[in-house]
Image: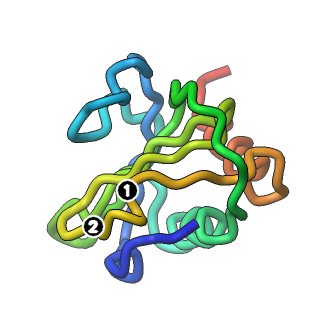
Amino acid sequence: MLLPLAHGKTELIEVIRITDPLRHLSSEDLAGDTAAIWESDRAQQALSLIAELPNSELYRCFLPGWGIRAHDSTDQLFEIAFCFRCHGARMWGPDLPAEHQGQSFDAESAAALELLRRFRSCLPD
């Protein structure tokens, strides 16, 4: 998956559990509840997994269940919502090129399955 150039500045990631997936069809940002904060190595590992996500055919439902907000030391850098059903991702951020805003990924790939496992591990038992 193509990540914005600003991803190299990321110091922490908020893992977002999306509570209203229909909102994201036309929204201007990511909405949901913060499920976890990943810092330092954990944040970089998550970004590496996201960068490794291979392209796939997009199926169009786009009902995302998980997302991230990437931050540097002072600002929010970008946001991504993931739909593991339709293999779609939507990205928001300042000066984001059009090819970054809507992307597809193979939700069955090893990187996607590991990313989803990490997201789910943020939920209380």
**Residue drawn at (62%, 69%) of the image:** 45
In the drawing, does residue 18 fall left or right of residue 57? Answer: left
N-term-proximal mark, 1 vs 2: 2
- Residue 1, by quadrant, is bottom right
Q: Residue 4, percent across and down?
A: 38, 73
Looking at the rendered structure, the secondary structure element under dot 2 is loop
Q: Residue 84, percent across and down?
A: 66, 36
Q: Residues within 10 Å of mark 2 (few under 14, many from 20)?
A: some
Residue 85's disc is: none
Q: Residue 74, percent across and down?
A: 15, 68
Count how many numbered circles sit on residues in the image. 2
Q: Are marks 1 and 2 in contact (CB under 8 Å)?
A: yes
**Residue that numbered label 2 is attached to:** 96
In the drawing, does residue 123 fall left or right of residue 29? Answer: right
Q: How is the image coloured?
A: rainbow
Q: Amino acid at mark 1?
A: Gln
Q: Amino acid at mark 2?
A: Leu
**Residue that numbered label 1 is attached to:** 101
Q: Is residue 49 above or below residue 102?
A: below
Looking at the rendered structure, the secondary structure element under dot 1 is helix
Of 4 and 55, which appears nearest the observer?
A: 55
Q: Is residue 78 above or below residue 74?
A: above
**Residue drawn at (33%, 63%) of the image:** 98
**Residue drawn at (69%, 42%) of the image:** 116
Q: Residues within 10 Å of mark 1 (few under 14, many from 20)?
A: some
Q: Which quarter of the image is occupied by the C terminus?
A: top right
**Residue drawn at (51%, 65%) of the image:** 43
Distance (Cα) linking label 1 and label 2: 7 Å
In the drawing, does residue 57 fall left or right of residue 109? Answer: left
